[in-house]
């Protein structure tokens, strides 16, 4: 009866995606497998009959992986290059930890226990939860099912262990972080109208010079409200709308006077405000200052909603397609500002076929050159080639009329589709071999090697972060990025509310993938 799944591979593929996605939603304590649930359902179904795996459509896994790594690179590139100089020591320590872990896997597994390189390479990818690494291991192996078996053993082990490590760090209160002060950027934003009772220069207010406090609307004593352009002195009887974090707004209110009983923005006959969706590709990759809303329309951006995060719209903030910008503007110019920014919902999911096609083609081209060291051939391949190219293009953001970055929603959609397709194909192709190897003495030996290597690896990252004076929140983010699993990042964010968790994740995420891919190809050659 299982032959049905081999005879109708497209049906099989999508039933695995559906059932695996449901399985990924099941919570095991603090752990959810997420997209990896598709891999395990694929392994289960593929284990039922040896004909199911070979029926997977050829080339489909490469397409799924390319979409995944390319969209990841576009998002991770800017953060990687931004953090390259200030976090170089941390990045170097992470690279050393990854290499040491690879050597430990090779020695314990290959030399001591005699486990084959492809199994160890897949297991190394598993304890790093790196899907591109699994693809690199399969591309370098004579039998692609062997790395998949190691990956399936290492992946759940990695998620559980990393969450335990993050929980342990979160429980440590005496974690000085002497070289990692907070960014000063607010975690949440508030807006308040203030009655000015004393003469104050704007630049003298706490947080104003640092860009942590903005003024959006000003009403002079006895005058009419207007959008703030160049605010200098405030006098008794004035009213001003402050925007910033709760602490900065509270300090500004105390310095100026007292909260007003009526909010100025509730009066919309002169000054209007609204959130406008940025869909004009000419503005993507430009800063708030560069789009010059004040010079063009007498308007001002105060907040940017990006995904689930509210950002203060300081002048150096880089804008992305799909940002929702809170703009205050003269009422009569609302339509002009809206048209300038775009505000077209239909464009939120649009993808430039020209820029994406050129970017992926360049990525595949970058993956072709290879270097042979002894019996091992190293190359970026179809996993790292598109990733590296996308990181560079994500950093550039645009080249003339070509906008390389994607709208956030389109990026996440393509990423999810690519990942699900790749994992379903890998699971189906490798299920029968997994059934043969995983539940045996061989599987137990491989599990023991991966457990020892994972503990060594994660502990090394924590030690490096502690010695380099990183804060507790950033250390949690660094570990999540080092392992590369978004579920771990979500868990870290649930334990501490600090933007350094996400910046730490972005610092190591892409770099760790690239280093793992190189190490994996070396391990296969054992």
Image (cartoon, rainbow, N blue to C red):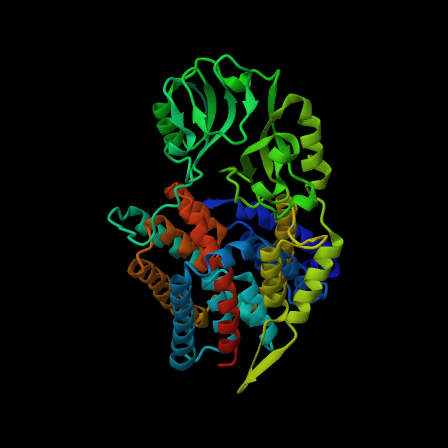
The residue that appears at 69% across and 41% down in the rendered structure is 280
- Foreground of the two, 160 or 187: 187
- Foreground of the two, 152 or 453: 453
Q: Is residue 29 visible?
A: no
Residue 150 screen position, x and y as percent: 50, 67
Question: Which quadrant of the figure has residue 161?
Answer: bottom left
Q: Is residue 514 left or right of residue 50?
A: left
Q: Is residue 385 left or right of residue 115?
A: right
Among all residues in the image, which is located at the extreme bottom? 374
The residue that appears at 53% across and 87% down in the rendered structure is 374
Q: Is residue 5 left or right of residue 98?
A: right
Residue 72 screen position, x and y as percent: 58, 55
Vertical placement of residue 502 versus 44, above or below: above
Residue 108 screen position, x and y as percent: 38, 76
The residue that appears at 43% across and 23% down in the rendered structure is 234
Vertical placement of residue 294 versus 268, above or below: below
Vertical placement of residue 374 versus 21, above or below: below
Vertical placement of residue 439 versus 199, above or below: below
Q: How many marks?
A: 0
Q: Is residue 201 visible?
A: yes
- Foreground of the two, 299 or 148: 299
Question: Which quadrant of the figure has residue 13?
Answer: bottom right
Residue 426 screen position, x and y as percent: 61, 63
- Foreground of the two, 170 or 332: 332
The N terminus - image quarter? bottom right
């Amino acid at each position: 009866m299982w032959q049905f799944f081999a005879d109708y591979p497209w049906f099989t593929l999508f039933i695995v995606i559906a059932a695996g996605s449901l399985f990924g939603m099941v919570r095991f304590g603090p752990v959810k497998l997420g997209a990896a649930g598709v891999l395990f359902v694929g392994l289960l179904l593929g284990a039922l009959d040896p004909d199911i795996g070979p029926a997977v459509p050829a080339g489909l896994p490469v397409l799924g992986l390319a979409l995944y790594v390319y969209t990841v690179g576009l998002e991770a590139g800017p953060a990687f290059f931004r953090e390259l100089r200030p976090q170089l020591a941390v990045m170097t320590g992470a690279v050393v930890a990854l290499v040491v872990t690879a050597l430990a896997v090779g020695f314990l597994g290959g030399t001591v226990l005699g486990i084959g390189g492809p199994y160890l390479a897949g297991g190394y990818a598993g304890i790093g939860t790196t899907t591109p690494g699994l693809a690199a291991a399969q591309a370098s192996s004579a039998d692609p099912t062997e790395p998949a078996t190691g990956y399936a053993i290492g992946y759940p082990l990695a998620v559980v262990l990393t969450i335990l490590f993050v929980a342990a760090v979160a429980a440590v209160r005496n974690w000085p972080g002497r070289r990692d002060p907070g960014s000063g950027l607010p975690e949440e934003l508030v807006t308040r109208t203030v009655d000015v009772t004393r003469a104050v220069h704007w630049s003298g207010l706490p947080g104003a010079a640092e860009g942590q406090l903005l003024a959006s609307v000003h009403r002079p004593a006895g005058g009419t409200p207007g959008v703030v352009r160049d605010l200098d002195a405030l006098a008794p009887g004035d009213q001003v709308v402050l925007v910033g974090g709760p602490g900065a707004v509270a300090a500004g209110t105390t310095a100026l006077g007292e909260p007003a009983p009526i909010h100025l923005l509730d009066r919309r006959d002169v000054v209007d405000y609204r959130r406008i969706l940025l869909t004009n590709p000419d503005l993507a990759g430009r800063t708030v200052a560069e789009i010059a809303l004040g010079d063009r329309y007498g308007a001002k951006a105060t907040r940017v909603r990006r995904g689930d995060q509210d950002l203060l719209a300081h002048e150096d903030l880089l804008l992305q397609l799909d940002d929702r910008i809170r703009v205050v503007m003269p009422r009569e110019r609302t339509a002009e500002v809206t048209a300038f920014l775009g505000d077209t919902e239909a464009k939120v999911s649009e993808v430039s076929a020209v820029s994406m096609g050129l970017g992926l083609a360049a990525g595949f081209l970058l993956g072709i050159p290879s270097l042979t060291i002894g019996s091992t051939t190293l190359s970026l391949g179809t996993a790292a080639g598109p990733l590296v190219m996308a990181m560079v293009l994500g950093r550039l953001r645009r080249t003339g009329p070509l906008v390389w970055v994607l709208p956030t929603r389109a990026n996440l959609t393509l990423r999810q589709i690519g990942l699900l397709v790749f994992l379903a194909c890998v699971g189906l192709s490798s299920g029968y071999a997994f059934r043969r190897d995983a539940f045996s003495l061989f599987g137990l030996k491989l599990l023991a090697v991966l457990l020892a290597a994972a503990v060594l690896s994660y502990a090394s990252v924590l030690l490096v972060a502690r010695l380099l004076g990183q804060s507790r929140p950033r250390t949690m983010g660094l570990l999540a990025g080092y392992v590369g699993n978004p579920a771990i990042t979500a868990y870290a964010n649930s334990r501490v509310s600090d933007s350094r968790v996400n910046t730490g994740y972005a610092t190591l995420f892409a770099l760790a993938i690239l280093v793992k891919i190189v190490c994996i190809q070396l391990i296969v050659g054992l």
